[in-house]
Amino acid sequence: MKKRKNALRDTLGDKIFYIINGFFLLLLALIILYPLYFIIIASISDPDAVLGGEVVLYPVRVTLEGFQKIMERSDVWRGYLNTIIYTALTVVLALAVTVPAGWALSRKTLPGKKLFMIYFIIPMFFGGGLIPFYNVMSSLGLINTMWAVILPAILSVWNLFMTKTFFESSIPNGLIEAAKIDGAGQFRIFTSVVIPLSKAVIAVMALYYAVGQWNSYFNAMIFLQDESKYPLQLVLKEILIASESTVGGSGETILQQFRMANLLKYVSVIVSSLPVLCLYPFVQKYFAQGVMIGSLKE
């Protein structure tokens, strides 16, 4: 009888625990999702309603004026095209650098491995600063070229170490030895054995580099002078600055500009984030697997 009561008490305690956990997880989900939901409903609501605090749970006086204003601008479409080009080239070059480098650093037989590790670790803690960075780019003749945006982004030391750890924990040494016995060289082993087994981490690295480049605007703001080469984020930034300018305007004009600036603020988030949100489901199945396997080492 006592055993049954203890079992019942444990079961009831488990239920209470699950209920409390579920409540906190639901609360956390609401805290994370509501700002995203608010941006969506605010982007299609009347600016006066948003400024007046009327938009809380649903859109008020639905309007697509903000999207219309954004999409009518040719510089936005040009910025989209530039960002797609920058992102695609960055991902291809970054994978071509990060994956082989991660594989090389994961091998115990790599000559000078410790020196290479130190060489890569130092930039994680110390940087030369903006002025030396600009001088280097200028001396290489990269100012006002798309390579000033692409080249600095093709290697992340953090991503490199994640890739290295993935190879160390996920590629069996026995498989490599078997390939060597069959007469495969290092290049053949890498292309025919390692790459097919590394789809998870490759997908994760591609997502990381793509999102990082898509959201980047600082290097473009520093190194690009021709507006026709601006990426989308920088174009949207210029639009917001222009719409918030109130110099020399009447009171009504200033109010109209403020309303439009507030509307464009939410619309620009949707416009700039939508492609990444559409891309994520295609690599989501690799995401957790690639990150978790790369974070563990037997």
Image (tube, rainbow, N blue to C red):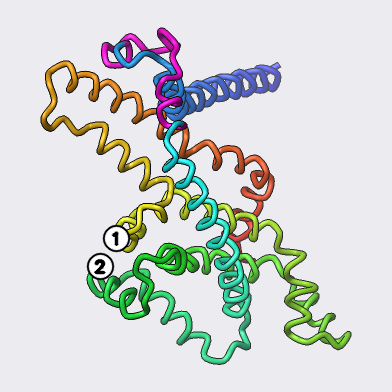
**In front: 66, or 100?**
66
> Is disc 1 surrounded by few (<14), some (14 to 19) or many (20+) residues within 10 Å?
some
> Contact, CB < 8 Å: mark 1 with mark 2?
yes
Residue 127 position by quadrant: bottom left
- Pinpoint residue 207: horizontal percent, then vertical percent: 57, 52
- Secondary element under disc 2, as helix, strand or loop, is helix
Which residue bears the numbered disc 2?
Answer: 130
- Pinpoint residue 21: horizontal percent, then vertical percent: 52, 26
- Pinpoint residue 2: horizontal percent, then vertical percent: 67, 19
Which-is-in-front pick, marks 1 and 2?
A: 1
**In front: 119, or 247?**
247
Please give the name of the residue rendered at 37% of the width and 79% of the height, measured from the top-left corner.
140
Which residue bears the numbered disc 1?
Answer: 222
Q: How many marks?
A: 2
Please give the name of the residue rendered at 27% of the width and 16% of the height, measured from the top-left corner.
51
- Secondary element under disc 1, as helix, strand or loop, is helix
Up-down: is 228 above or below 158?
Answer: above
Q: Left or right? Give the position of 114 relative to 207.
A: left
> Which of disc 2 and disc 1 is earlier in sequence?
2
**In front: 19, or 43?**
43
Disc 1 marks which amino acid? Ile
- Pinpoint residue 71: horizontal percent, then vertical percent: 46, 32
Disc 2 marks which amino acid? Leu
Please give the name of the residue rendered at 56% of the width and 70% of the height, measured from the top-left corner.
98
Please give the name of the residue rendered at 73% of the width and 71% of the height, measured from the top-left corner.
194
The CA distance from mark 1 to mark 2 is 9 Å
Residue 255 position by quadrant: top left
**In front: 58, or 65?**
65
Specify the segment rendered in magenta: 49-71
Q: Quadrant of the C terminus?
A: bottom right
Is residue 124 one of those drawn in magenta? no
Q: Can see residue 156?
A: no
